[in-house]
Image (tube, rainbow, N blue to C red):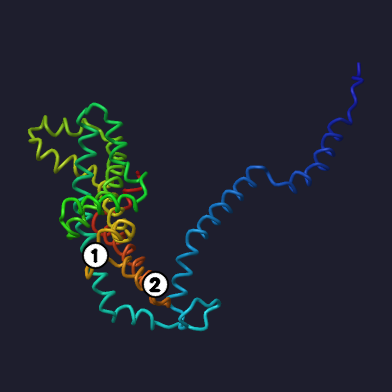
Amino acid sequence: MTSLAPRSQPHLAASHDLTTAPARRGTTPPRHWGRRLYLAANITILVFLLMPIAIVIVFALNPTPFIQFPPVGVSLRWFEKFFVSRDFMHALAFSLEVAALTTAAATVLGASAALAIARGNLPGSRLIVATMLSPLMLPAILTGLALFQSYVLLDVGRPLWGLVAGHTLVAIPYVVRTTLAVLHNFDVRLEEAAQNLGASPTRTFFEVTLPLVKPGVMAGAIFAFIVSFDQFPVSLFLVAPGNETLPITLFNYLKFDLDGTIGAASVVSILLAFIVVIALDRTVGLRSYVKL
């Protein structure tokens, strides 16, 4: 008995696939559009972040004393003017000194506070963390004004340690946050194993704990250095005449003149921050910081 089912169905199905195949190949899957939009958004954000740096570099290398685009040439006259200026060189050296002292103080205090919060089982630890991070929430200009009024009431003037204390206050939250991020995933059993093998608490700290939390501590130190070196609002109230940081000197320079020297000073600041990051990468290895 022969089947009455139509035998042309496979042929029809094949022809249907052939007619729809070009349409399928011509359409882009939704996930491809999503990937393209994601890449476009990231490129736009990257350009937006790097555009001010590019403008500053063009301004610093432009031979004319004003921003001109497209530039008419390339000149190092503004860098020469910056480096031969006694005021700028003194401000640069003073800013580096303050930033170095601030980095040391903020790193020690911030890392110690983070260890105490993470290991001390302190009551109200969340409130303590919020208090440590509060300088990030308060406008820096108000912090500088409050410190200035405090120094006036104490009749201490505007000493170097007062400026370093103000910078340390706004830099400590960065060290605390990055160190806590490392301690959050810290395996306490490593310390217990070292102590079971006869290591003293001090030796355990320097040979086990400190190397493991070093990425967070060093990342916080980088932030502390950059924040201190570029700090303007706090320095505006706490610097003494004759001992002004580079941002304050640039601000005073802008009152009377506006030329490529500002751009040259900005490029030098950017390069210094970049050199600090590269130096730490060569010495302690910043590639491990991606864990943060």
Up/down of 244 relative to 23, above or below = below
Mark 2 is surrounded, within 10 Å at the Cα level, by few (under 14), some (14 to 19) or many (20 or more) other residues, namely few
The amino acid type of the residue labelled 2 equals Leu
x, y percentage for residue 166?
24, 53
**Front-most of residues 59 and 119:** 59
x, y percentage for residue 130?
32, 36
Mark 2, mark 1: which one is toward the viewer?
Answer: 2
Please report whichever mark, 2 or 1, sits nearer to the chain's N-terminal start: 1
For disc 2, the marked residue is: 254
Q: Is residue 203 left or right of residue 49?
A: left
x, y percentage for residue 222?
29, 54
For disc 1, the marked residue is: 96
Residue visible at 20% across and 54% down?
152
Up/down of 81 relative to 31, above or below = below
Residue visible at 21% across and 39% down?
113
Asked which secondary structure carries label 2, the reply is helix
Residue visible at 33% across and 57% down?
233
Distance Cα–Cα, label 2 vs label 1: 21 Å
Up/down of 126 relative to 228, above or below = above
